[in-house]
Image: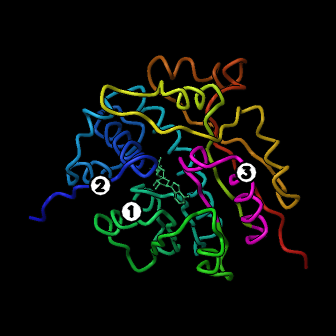
Amino acid sequence: MSSAARPDLAAVPETMLWTLWQRAVEARRPDALLHDPKAVELVDRIDYPFAERFGTSGFQSQLQALRVGCFDREVSDFLAREPRGTVVCLGEGLETQYWRVDNGRAHWLTVDLPEAVALREELLPPGPRQRYLAADATDLAAWADEVDRDRAVLITAEGLLMYLPPDRVKALIADCADRFPGGSLVLDAVPRWFARLTRTGRMRTATYQAPAMPWAMDARERDKLRTASPAVAAVRDVRPAAARGLLGALLPFALTAPPLATRRPSVTVLDFAAPAR
Ligand SMILES: C[S@@+](CC[C@H](N)C(=O)[O-])C[C@H]1O[C@@H](n2cnc3c(N)ncnc32)[C@H](O)[C@@H]1O
């Protein structure tokens, strides 16, 4: 039996263990909102004090599952329209979306920092339709040419943009719109009040301090993303599916009634203008 992987990660790259853990906590529940056996398997193979550092909260794992569900739905819809398309996953970490939604024909490109890609390669060796690239996602010169222009493209930035400075978020959107006309970008954002908690060190457990989040966006600010580039042709909110328990009862209000509806975490799709003919 292979020995357990011992990740040596800190700061933002370590957050990929947080999202992995939340998916595994959720997937282990009998009433799970997310089916993710690969995440459970990975957690079992990694030597890291997950529970001690991140806690075991069914509330957090459910929130994470709702966010992941939004991304999975967008990728599945894209693959239904474009079965041979390319999904570019920026800051993919140990996300196991490929094992949840792949259709057997799509191409997948992972772009993440070197230490994250090294761990992903060790734990999730790429299949013939997957490529992993160690690069800064904001440097399109490092990865955009790796994407086949003859295929439709969907770019995802799941749990990534909040860790970037606001000017780099704007530049990344503009560069993607410029390089991938007719493509789309799915991104998520934390609201401003939440980012403030991270910047003042109040998102912590006894042994873990979440890194500061320099970029935030309240849900009501979504349309401002158009200002990143005139090539952003459409902006669409992606709403989570039904939740369980108290959150399930409150979700319809949280999505429609201020102040939470305007200041909630959000998932947004940006469609880029198609190429001129
Ligand atoms: C919260 S984790 C999200 C991982 C995965 N998307 C998920 O949802 O499980 C943040 C990820 O962004 C990556 N990251 C941070 N800054 C990056 C950058 N400039 N370029 C590429 N990846 C980056 C980190 O290495 C990490 O894998």
Which quadrant of the figure contains the C terminus? Answer: bottom right
The amino acid marked with disc number 2 is: Asp
Q: How many marks?
A: 3
Question: Which percent across, then down, holds residue 207?
Answer: 30, 31
- Callout 1: CB less than 8 Å from ligand 1: yes
The quarter of the rendered structure image containing the N terminus is bottom left
Q: Secondary structure at mark 2?
A: loop
- Residue 23 position (above or below residue 259): below
> Circle 2 is placed at which residue position?
8
Report the span colored magenta.
154-182
- Quick check: is 158 in the magenta stretch? yes
Q: Amino acid at mark 3?
A: Asp
Which residue has dot 3 on it? 167
Mark 2 or mark 1: which comes first in sequence?
2
Comparing 139 with 220, the one in front is: 139
Q: Secondary structure at mark 1?
A: helix
> Which of the two discs, 2 and 3, labels the residue nearer the N terminus?
2
Q: Quadrant of residue 29?
A: top left
Among the 4 quarters of the image, the one containing residue 88: bottom right
Q: Decide whether residue 215 is among the magenta residues.
A: no
Q: Nearer the viewer, residue 177 or 141?
A: 141
Q: Position of residue 237 (x, y in %)?
A: 71, 41
Residue 108, image x, y percentages: 51, 70
**Which residue is tagged 1?**
115
